[in-house]
Amino acid sequence: ENERNKLATVFLHMTDGIVAFSGEGAVIQFNPAAERFLGLKLTDTELRFDEIFGDIAPLSRVLDMGQDEVIEGEKENGSRSLDVFLAPFRGESAQGGILAVVHDVTEQRRSDEMRREFVANVSHELRTPITNVRSYAETLVDSAGDLPPETEQRFLNVILGESDRMTKIVQDLLALSRFDAGEMQFTMVPFDLTESAVKVYEAMRLDVEKHGIDLHISLPTEQLRVYGDQARIEQVIINIMTNAERYTPSGGSVTMELERSKDTIIVRVRDTGIGIPEEDIPHIFDRFYRVDKARSRAMGGTGLGLSIAYEIIKRHNGEIRIESKVGEGTAVSICLPRLEGAGT
């Protein structure tokens, strides 16, 4: 009885799903994980083996297998991806039954898919500038000085620009790699976020206004102190401001606001730009994800800036929120913990 209780406890708390069937295909035992993965109530006496796993192999085929043989198959249950292993077991009767083991491999499949997409995206992002550099360099070599000086200079400028673009992609990839490996170093100090916001505003004002966009800033009277890496937080604000400028047409406006909400300091960047479709917002921090792919590449974006910003803020125990409507604009809020005892 003690051994039976031990086995029942292990069976109950296993992370894999287990279902045992009789030789006639009736469910004789199962654990909660199996019901959860399969999305079925296995207490339903009408459910049989062929209804649950018949798409992988019929009952008779599994029962006829040798003791050391296993059939492996796959099932989908909504968004879940499942690996299923079917094997016969021998009981007191000659017929015995079937044991099904169900693994939930949803996260593994999602990770594999993201890895494949990442490799494809990196290849695509680097292929274009490499092709351009080679094409213009070959033209310069083949022309052997026959091109007008201004054309040569234009070609050289293209080569330099594409080289800078590749360098930026590699630098961003290395930064994300260091984040993933936990090797990114931060210099954490108390500082006034208001001063950082003003610094970014002054640094970007001329460039933003040069594109015909009005730039505004709204600051509270109190100090808004946080604890973090000041240079990296300013990098995040610059990244968000740059995106706002990039996707706001001439005649629009970009506004930076700072406010305190309970124990949180919020830097909010609002723009009157083209906005983000609702279905794209959940993916906006994915690596290489772009809403307007053609325009982003044309303007030199790598599709990694928001991913880096997300990683930096996450390591400061903060978060980034995005609200947007197509044709009306976007508001990006950087939320950071307020330094205890700071301000009035």
Image (tube, rainbow, N blue to C red):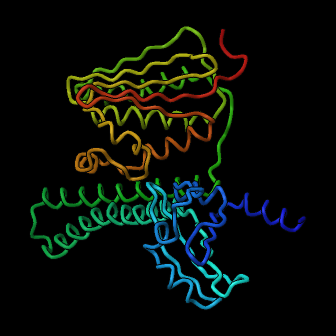
**Placement of 222 over or under 106, stated as above or below:** above
Q: Nearer the viewer, residue 315 or 65?
A: 65
Lateral position of residue 12 relative to residue 317, left or right: right
Q: Quadrant of the N terminus?
A: bottom right
Q: Nearer the viewer, residue 253 or 17?
A: 17
**Placement of 300 over or under 123, stated as above or below:** above
Q: Nearer the viewer, residue 98 or 319?
A: 98
Q: Residue furthest right?
A: 2
**Placement of 222 over or under 29, stated as above or below:** above
Q: Residue furthest bottom?
A: 66
Q: State the image coordinates of residue 268 (x, y, percent, origin top left).
A: 45, 24
Say which residue appears at 68% left-offset and 16% top-offset.
342
Q: Nearer the viewer, residue 341 or 280?
A: 280
Q: State the image coordinates of residue 26 (x, y, percent, origin top left).
A: 57, 69
| Res 79 quadrant in image | bottom left
Say which residue appears at 34% left-offset and 42% top-offset.
280
Q: Quadrant of the C terminus?
A: top right
Q: State the image coordinates of residue 123 (x, y, percent, origin top left).
A: 36, 66
Q: State the image coordinates of residue 172 (x, y, percent, origin top left).
A: 46, 53
Lateral position of residue 201 relative to residue 226, left or right: left
- The mark total stands at 0
Say which residue appears at 41% left-offset and 17% top-offset.
217
Lateral position of residue 263 relative to residue 267, left or right: right
Say which residue appears at 64% left-offset and 64% top-offset.
16
